[in-house]
Amino acid sequence: SASETPQYADLAVDKQVSNAAPNVGDILTYTITVTNNGKDDAENVFLTDTLTSISELSIVGTPVTSAGTFDPTSGIWNIGRVYVGTPATLLVQAEVLAPATGAPQPIVNIAAISDINKPKQYDPDPNNNSDSATATPQYADLRVIKNVNNPAPNVGSNIVFGIVVDNLGKDQATGVEIIDVLPPGLTFVSASSNDYNPGTGIWSVGTVDVGPANAKALQIEATVAASGIWTNEAEVSTA
């Protein structure tokens, strides 16, 4: 009699992302690991990664592989052979881009063993041949409201501008600065906070948490030094 023992390789894909809650502009590192839990080495292994097709990500630098080659244009990792007990790894870095419109949505990145160029060895468990990593960019929607206590003052009188900033977004806003430079016809008198610099017009707000209850406010008092129509604007400069 004669017996044959068919070869098999159980390929398992694991995908991780360095930061699941990044800011737009952050650099993420994706780590893909392909492990062979089978009895025999796997040959002709290809993996496809969807990162290259995601508009909110842009690959930066050169991807690093422990085996084979990765094409950053097609997203195909030609691993070649995956040895039993010796995982193959791929590291890809990508910058988080702002969405074309609206608020950022979760970015789901999938890595999967190719069904087109299948490994030569039989895989008894195809359910672990893919994995995904999700990154949900943070965002803050800052709203600035400005008013004046007297829109038609006399020359020589004092007026008070009120500025309120709140966060209508999903996440805390940090490092917030608002610029409010008084026009030439107004002379600075005082501000309700030492965080306002009358020389630069910058109000260093700092952190603004989500919700109207966490709004920050500033009052600026100024003297009307000359007649005319004076427009005073306040806008977010950094956040």
Image: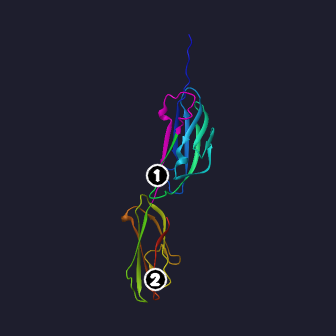
Q: Residue furthest top?
A: 1
Give the residue type at disc 1.
Answer: Thr
Is-magenta flag for residue 115? yes
Q: Secondary structure at mark 1?
A: loop
| Residue 139 horizontal side relative to residue 67, left or right | left
Residue 147, quarter of picture: bottom left
Residue 3, quarter of picture: top right
The residue nearer to you, when weighing 135 against 195, is 135
Of mark 2 and mark 1, the one earlier in the sequence is: 1
Give the residue type at disc 2.
Answer: Trp
Q: Position of residue 102 (x, y in %)?
A: 44, 58
On residue 136, the disc is 1
The residue nearer to you, when weighing 97 against 35, is 97
Tell me which residue sits at (46%, 58%) in the image: 101
Q: Is residue 201 above or below residue 83?
A: below
Q: Is residue 229 above or below residue 18?
A: below
Q: Secondary structure at mark 2?
A: loop
Give the CA distance from mark 2 to mark 1.
43 Å
The residue nearer to you, when weighing 64 against 218, is 64
Q: Position of residue 53 (x, y in %)?
A: 53, 48
Residue at which label 2 appears: 230
Label the magenta part by its dominant secondary structure.
loop
What span is colored magenta in the figure?
A: 112-139
Tell me which residue sits at (41%, 88%) in the image: 157
